[in-house]
Amino acid sequence: MVPVLVRGVVPDERYLDAAHRIRSGQITREQARAELLALEILADDSEDLELSDDFDESKHPRDEKGRFTHAMSSMPVAKATSKEAKKWRKEHQERYTNDKDFRLVADAAALYAQGSYSELGLESARAVGFDPNPSAKRDHTLPLNAIASPLATYKNYFDGQDLENTTSGSVREGAIALSRAVADSAPLDAPIYRGINIFPHPNAPKTAEYFSSLKSGDEINLPGVTSFTTDHEIADQFALGVAKGQGKGGGTPVLAVTFEIEKGARGLPVAALSPWDQKEIITQGRFKVVGITKNKREMFIKSKGYYVEYDAAHVVLRQDEVYKP
């Protein structure tokens, strides 16, 4: 156990970071107070900093620079009904109940993982200065539950969670919290993957040519939070358009692209808040192509009972920058 700063029941990761630097002699308590006031983590000068020995530092992961990472980054990449996911949620129930910032991220992550990815992806891009779809108008001051589809049934995984009626924050606040959690997450110790498919349509040849012409050194920008998976096979299934729950395109794809982001990227697990077994991790930022291979592949279509051959591209990316609003 080490002494840490506490605020309320559950300490903020930035409190923990400040406490670490106080303990190691890097800054004084007064300097820590000034930093936390500037970040608006402390309400005002009258709010006191307390030291406590009642905290297990080992339960809070650090990044490669020794900084405390976001509590959500310790989430297991496992389906919500798994033993690992249930254990993690039980360990973080007190935090969900008492820490409004954690509750906002958890609610936004759960809504994203259960279908509201377009809205939160768009708002998180706008929050860092990009607008991929200027024609899409939405009042980002609306509460988070405004992006819950009336046709969907959302599953609540924490005690007291109510995604369809949540008041934990606005759409913009939820998107910002999600982006910041990605930026503050622990570096991933394994690659992550995303599959996209280009099915026959008028613009398909041009789109396929763009992806096929990618080369090492090219940049790809993901301005908003975007879904990836730790499972290469799941990404390949999405690339072919046969993943479970995926809307199917028409026929065999013109091109199936699987992206691989090298280990070390910042990514936030959301799998333990999703009913689907997709081993989902979200990330965003600026990426550089470090390798690409193109070939012919085939996959067995179980529903039809035969193999199909298709053009495929495997694009390896390195995360050069993670956006943080």
Image (cartoon, rainbow, N blue to C red):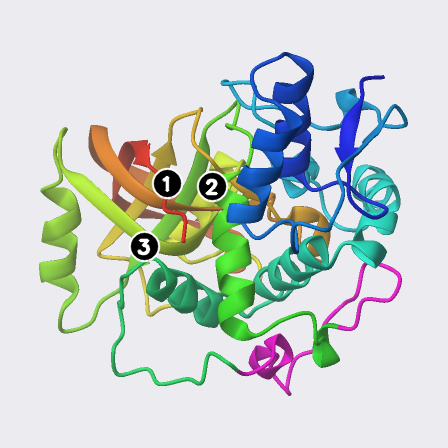
Q: Quadrant of the N terminus?
A: top right
Compared across the picture, whether 239 is left or right of 203 comes to: right
Confirm whether the magenta stretch covers residue 157: yes
Q: In this rendered view, identify the residue nearer to me: 94 or 223.
A: 94
| Kind of element beneath mark 3 | strand
Find residue 221 and report its horizontal and vertical position in percent.
25, 48
Residue shown at 50%/49% (left/top)?
180
- State left or right for residue 73 relative to residue 243: right
Would you say the residues marked 2 and 3 are in contact, meaning their CB atoms lie under 8 Å apart?
no
**What is the crowding at mark 1: few (fewer than 14 residues within 10 Å), some, or many (at least 20)?**
many
Amino acid found under the numbered disc labelled 2? Ala
Q: Is 260 placed left or right of 201 in the picture?
A: right
In front here: 145 or 112? 145
Q: Can you tell which quarter of the image residue 293 is in?
A: top left
Label 2 crowd bin: few (<14), some (14–19), many (20+), radius 10 Å:
many
- The answer to whether mark 1 and mark 2 are in CB contact below 8 A is yes
**Does residue 214 appear in this view?**
yes
Question: Would you place residue 319 above or below residue 240 in this image?
Answer: above
Of residue 29 and residue 143, the one placed in the foreground of this image is: 29
* Badge number at residue 322: 1
Q: Residue 223: which disc?
A: 3
Percent coordinates x, y for residue 88 in the rendering: 81, 40
- Mark 3 to mark 1 CA distance (whole Å): 9 Å
What's the residue type where badge 1 is placed?
Val
The reply to whether the magenta stretch includes residue 139 is no
Q: Is residue 298 above or below residue 249?
A: above
Dot 2 or dot 3: first in sequence order is 2
Residue 183 — which label? 2
- Disc 1 element: loop
Residue at 41%, 48% (x, y): give it.
324
